[in-house]
Structure formats: C-alpha cells, structure tokens
Amino acid sequence: MLNPITAQDLLAPVAPPRPLVSPAVIKRLFDILSASLALLVALPVLMLLVIAVCVESPGNPFFVQERLGLDGKRFKLLKLRTMVPDAEKRQAELEHLNEAKPPLFKVKNDPRVTRIGKVLRGTSLDELPQLINVIRGEMSVVGPRPRLPHEFDVNDPAVARRLSVKPGLAGLWQVSGRAKLNYDEALALDLQYVDNWSFWLDLKLIARTFWVVLTLQGAY
C-alpha cells in the first residue's frame, strides 16, 4: 500500500534536473570545433609566417617546449619560433637582465628575439600552432596559460588547483596584463578562473582576448 503524500513532501526541495550533456563535454566539443575551424582559416597565414621565420633565421620554424598540462601531466607545446635557434642555451648569460621575479624570466628587449619574432609576439601569432595542441586534447581554447615545469611547485595546493583544468590559449591572464603580471598575480587570476568557470565566461574571455591582442595591450 502506498504511503499518502503529506504537505512536508510537497514542500521538500526538488533536485535540479541533470544536464543532458556535461559541461566538460560541451567545453571539449567547443574546443575541437572552434580550433579546427580556426586552424583551417589561419593555415595560409601560418604557412607565410613559417616562410618568414625561416628566411630571417634558418632552422626549425617551430619551437617545441615541455609544459605542464592537466593534473601536472607534461606535454609538448607548439609555437612559431620567435628567437634565434640557440636561444635556450644563451639564457644563462642574460639572467642579470631578468625583469621578472623568479621563477619567471622576462627581458623586455631580449636580444635573442628576431625581428619577425617581435611582430609574432606582439600580435600573439606565434601561438597559432597551439591550435593543434587544442585539437589533440592537451590544451583548451580558454584556460590558464601552460607553464614550464620548473616554474611550479606541484606539491603546492594552489598550484594543484590551477592544474585541475587544461591550460588554454586565452584566459584571464591574457586580458589582465599579459607579460606585465608577476607570478603571484598570474596565479591568482588563474585560480579565479578555475573557481568561477562557466561556458559563458569562456565566451567573454575569447571576445576580450581578441581586443587585447588587436590593441597589443601588455605585450612584451
């Protein structure tokens, strides 16, 4: 025999309906579709930039570097090369010019940067190959910037929280100062994104990133 429905039953809170598709799936689908379309549209420009990099500075036009991804997993980040081929070997001789607080390394007029490299950095066109990282699932269109392994203490709870999402091409860091931010400021913005993520926030950040890049705000 069924129990009668009471007034208390009618006033009991009702659990919200579960979404048909999880936010993580929506974000991944958006990443695949948007990155694939962007790469297709940008391919002619990317090819011209590859030629320009090689003409000015012979060598591999791409720069491949190990970065930290989701949950601290390492992956190979792709960029157009903006420096001379032996730039990493020459960093030690420029340590006295570092304008950032360690573990970051930033030199405003870095002598290793080529002429085409300055243009690529200012316009963020050097990051076009990272669309491939997005398609491969190593990055997202929006998220914290992927950092070098030595820049983070993975045992730090704040860092672990930051690494709980995929790194991205666009994010709060890019629209809030870019290269002008120090380590602590960048980490605080990354955690703010992690704690307040939504699909609509991603769309807003993409729109703001386009404006920041077009106006060259905060670029080194």
Image (cartoon, rainbow, N blue to C red):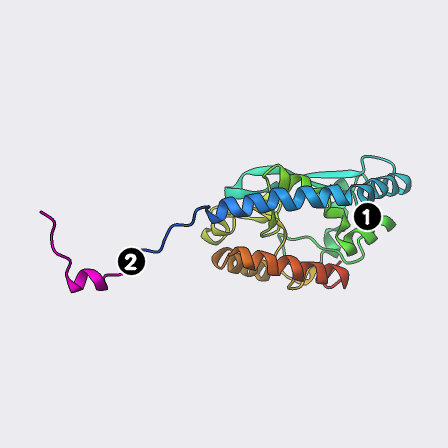
Mark 1 or mark 2, whichever is nearer to me = 2
Residue located beneath label 1 in the image: 112
Image quarter of residue 219: bottom right
The residue under label 1 is which amino acid type? Arg
Look at the magenta stretch and give its main secondary structure.
loop
Q: Residues within 10 Å of mark 1 (few under 14, many from 20)?
A: some
Q: Is residue 117 visible?
A: yes
Residue 143 in the image: above or below residue 68:
below
Q: Is residue 174 visible?
A: no
> What secondary structure is marked by label 2?
loop
At which x and y percent is residue 147?
Answer: 61, 47
Taking the image as shown, residue 70 lies to the left or right of residue 42, namely left
Taking the image as shown, residue 45 lies to the left or right of residue 184, namely right
Q: Residues within 10 Å of mark 2 (few under 14, many from 20)?
A: few
The residue lying toward the viewer, choosing from 103 and 147, is: 147
Between discs 1 and 2, the one toward the N terminus: 2
Circles 1 and 2: CB atoms closer than 8 Å: no
Q: Residue at x 75, y 56 (%)?
A: 107
Q: What range of the chain is rendered magenta?
A: 1-13
The residue under label 2 is which amino acid type? Val
